[in-house]
Image (cartoon, coloured by chain):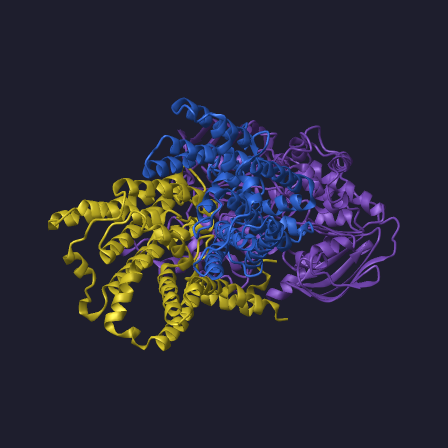
Chain colours: A blue, B purple, C yellow
Amino acid sequence: MKRPKLNPVVIALLLAVLLFALGGILRPGFASHAQAMNILRLAALLGVIAAGQTLVIISGGEGIDLSVGAVITLSATLTYRLVNGDNGMVLPALGLTLLVGLLIGVINGLGITLLRIPPLVMTLGMTGVVQGLVLVVTQGQMQGAVAPIMARLVARPLALGIPGVVLIWVVLGVAMWLVLQRTAYGKRLFAIGVNRTTARLSGVRVPRVVVATYGLSGMLAALGGFVLLGYTQIVFLNLGAPYTLPSIAAVVIGGTLLSGGQGGYAGTMAGALVLTLLTSLLTALQMPESARQIVYGGTLLVLLSVYGRQRALRQ
Amino acid sequence: MHQIALTAHQLVKRYGGVVALADGSLEVRSGEVVALVGANGSGKSTLGKIITGAVAPDGGQLILDGRAVHFPSPQAARRAGIAAVYQDLSLVPDLTVAENIWLAHEPIGWGWRVRRGAMREATARLLDLFAGTVRSTLTPETPVAALPPDERQIVEILKALSLNPRLMILDEATASLDSNQVARLFELVARWKAEGMAVIFVSHRMEEIFRLADRAVVLRSGQTVGTRDLRTTSEQELVALMIEGGLAVESRSAAGATRGAERLRVAGLRAGAVRGVDLSLHDGEIVGLGGLRGQGQTDLLLALFGALPFTGEVRLAGQPVRFTHPSQAMEAGIAFVPGDRTREGLLPIRSILENLLLPSWHRYGALLRLTQARRDAQAMAQRLNLVMESLDAPVSSLSGGNAQKVVLGKWLLREPRLLLLDDPTKGVDVGAKREFYQSLEELRDAGVAILLYSSDDEELLGLCDRVLVLRDGQVRAELAGPTLTRAELVSASIGALMGETS
Amino acid sequence: MSYAPAMTATTQVRRALAGRSYLFSVLLLIIVVSINYALQPNMFRPASLSGNLRTYLPLMLLAAGQAIIVIGGGIDLSIGAIVSLVNVIIVRALGVDPSPGRIALAIALGLLAGTLAGAFNGLCAAYLRFQPIITTFATSFVFSGLALWVLPSPGGVVPPDLLRAYAANPLRIPLAIWVAALVLLLWGALRATRFGTYLYAVGGQPLSAYVTGVPVSLVRLASYSIGGLLAACGSLALTLNTGTGDPLVGGPMTLPSVVAVVIGGTRLSGGQGGIAGALIGVVVLRLLDSIISFANVPSWWQTFAQGMIVMVALAGPGLVALVRGQRP
């Protein structure tokens, strides 16, 4: 138990640096400032999306939120329609989508606590429902437009050549750190992640914390959808789905225990960077889709072997 | 039965930097019961687990019948005729009693099929050994999940027995059993011994060790420090060997100093195994809950703490209350130290700081004032004389006694008016127990009302002002003053059970 | 306190249901079949029955494999990728106008690939002790990458004789029913062996099983391998049904396989349940889809309706418990 452990955040950051250097050596231009900013921007998108996932995984009880992808699509779709190119509508639209995301997450949490549906299954089922909602909202036609201010915020450099989305990410990072380390909610979240009986017998209202956590996850996914829309500037039915599993992978790479009760958002941020770098590197090397997928999966397995291993039965 | 002679020679086991066993040595042969004794964390269980192949040693030798052996798995040890009854149970809840007992050595018939009929019959024969001490609902087809702890323990014993072992290790096997069941087990062990079985008996209970064992091997801090013939050794001598520096006089509390106002009154309470309990508890008083295991003591405490739904009347300082969640009971000044530290009282992988403050975070503002919280936790750690690396070390790095201090400390930080304790010193070594009693007495003197369930009669006698003996979920006797004696306590609980079985 | 209500009626009911965890799915099946029959009275006509079951069979085999893995305490999120991989391997190995020997070889290769893929998952989860969910998520990329490498874009043909054989109705009973019965029979035989008990013990309480001497890692490896083999069988059925190869065909089947296992009454935490429920779960899922398409639901609402119905099916047991628990 007590063997000296490498800090997962440090491992992930080292890996990110390694990948970046590797990219620079193999493909001149990969390590350029513009490319670095682009990678940072993509990492920020994934990082924002994976914030809620971090909370849910820390909450334990096989916690996982597979509905983030669908919520992202729904949020982007709603924003796209509501904003319709009007800067003045951006804030109301953001408020509404966050509310919708919160609501979806709360329903997830209620299903998990009240009806005792396993999180994997509950959020999976919710994915189908939300995908259905997207179709109902759009009726097959993606109408609307991105407001100029959103594009400006996310896609272009905001200050000092740093894209706005990266600044949003940093602010979110600080907020997440405060929530996890400096609030009673954060302390209780870790507690229920380790042992729900102990938490309950210490006065923690476990179901409330669980519902709040899934609610937050839904809300953060909706925020992710809003930010993603600023980047893509266009909505399609499959917009969010490819982010679901990377959001989990980013959390795991960052060293948060899948069994709950230990971890943090700094790790997830590093994990998002590693995943994005890996994807960008494979794209830059012009690997065929098949090789990219194999390398992607293989890397995940390697990372799992570094610190994703469970305890041996025999000691 | 084949003869057996096993020698463990200077076995070593390290977990990371922590040495669990530095020099584990013992000898045991057919027809002999050897007790393995030592304080918590002395390495008894580790030594036992190495012998059964569940733990791989880092050094030393196991010599079986004159030859050095190495067990790569529990199966290998079982093939050599060594079976174990573990402290932490090794049963699978979803399987039936029969499936559990014969797991991994099922009788196999045609087409590799398990012969379920044969398995059932053999199980029924094994269950007959404990007939009369268990409920009639314990059958070969009962799922283990439906059994109370004592019956699970018995299934565990029968599971080891089903292997026809030459050497059986009983690791705290009596911890969950009531006295009838213990008596039956000891009869059986005597019979097995006569048939030539060797038995290693690991226990905290001195009285049982002297009743059952021929020799005692004493471990201290992972080292075998001596072997004693129990016919020529006194209890004091053995305990002195267990704890460094000899044994001081046993702590006994004076009778309750000042009894304050009535803190708790319960009338007709029913919850889980509790079937109508009336009781009254005053400030500055320690009231014990006695009786055999599983007579409703734990459920009573859980109900009072709002963790188990109940019917009936509960008044706290005169006010009727009905808690539906522990947080409400906590608001009203109640604290609860649960019986199973690891599963109910602690967050093992989190820091000592977080464990101590878990019930109290709301007091430190919306954006937690961590400096102040740390100061409070540090003060509590000092007050309880907590031996630790730092407040940021995980609780799992603490010994049993220190971990129990954390459980108590997290409640003392809330300054409770009513303290509920569910067998708090189970598995805690002698030294830590004494400190724990001292803390309780200080609290009592400070006017806290304390309701304590203990499976250790000595503890109830030494600590409590009054003891309520529970049987079948009801208070059957109240012992205080001159009637609070060991004989009364035992007869109130055991006499009652005899009446039931007849 | 966990054992205290051992004598209550609820527990007795639960005990009576133990080992019959599929009963809830049977109830659902009856409801769904009734509604389907009302909307579509010809559903029991041999032709449509046989045709429907043909399309159900691949997912049924997949769910059976998933159920065995879940009972053993794991989960396989790569099972759909295994289907894709086996599908393209079979189609590529068949080539154009294959001889009978080549057909046998192609099928054997496909089944072997599926078993090996499952065994690889098992190796990672059991011997290297990776978290099952994230491991199989990672291997799903490896397997679908391999599938894309074997066959970068959809194509290939399956000989018509094989397609006809798959559409056969021996003794006037659809082939799918024969296959399902065979799977259940083999499962029953397996369940009665020592391995059967091991599987449940390992899924329920691995540490206890280990200490007792159950070869936990081996049992896990076997459960993933059997799961992989069944996924390969499912892929074979799919290939014979669609008659072509597609490197992305299996992906969308992973999640329904898990949902079917849950509808079939198997706990995702392992150690309990069975595959009969999973098979029924698939039929329930598929019939729900057909209800929606036949019930004149406006097309843009269909996905939503399907999602809601799946949610209700998943919530069913919990809702019942909730209502019952709140009664005084």
User: How far from the left and from the top, in percent, is residue A80?
Assistant: 52, 52
- Residue B159 visible, this orientation: yes
User: How far from the left and from the top, in percent, is residue B122?
Assistant: 40, 57
Corner quadrant of residue A57: top right
Q: Is residue C277 left or right of residue C147?
A: right
User: How far from the left and from the top, in percent, is residue B493?
Assistant: 68, 58
B474, C267: nearer the viewer: C267
Residue lying furthest left in this view? C99
Corner quadrant of residue B497: bottom right
Give the quarter of the figure containing the N terminus of chain A.
top right
Vertical relation: A146 (above or below) B296: above
Count of picture labels: 0
C114, A13: nearer the viewer: A13
- Residue B87 visible, this orientation: no
Residue lying furthest top in this view? A25
Vertical relation: C6 (above or below) A280: below
Vertical relation: C126 (above or below) C264: above
B436, C55: nearer the viewer: C55
User: How far from the left and from the top, in percent, is residue B287?
Assistant: 78, 54
Q: Is residue C74 left or right of residue B466?
A: left
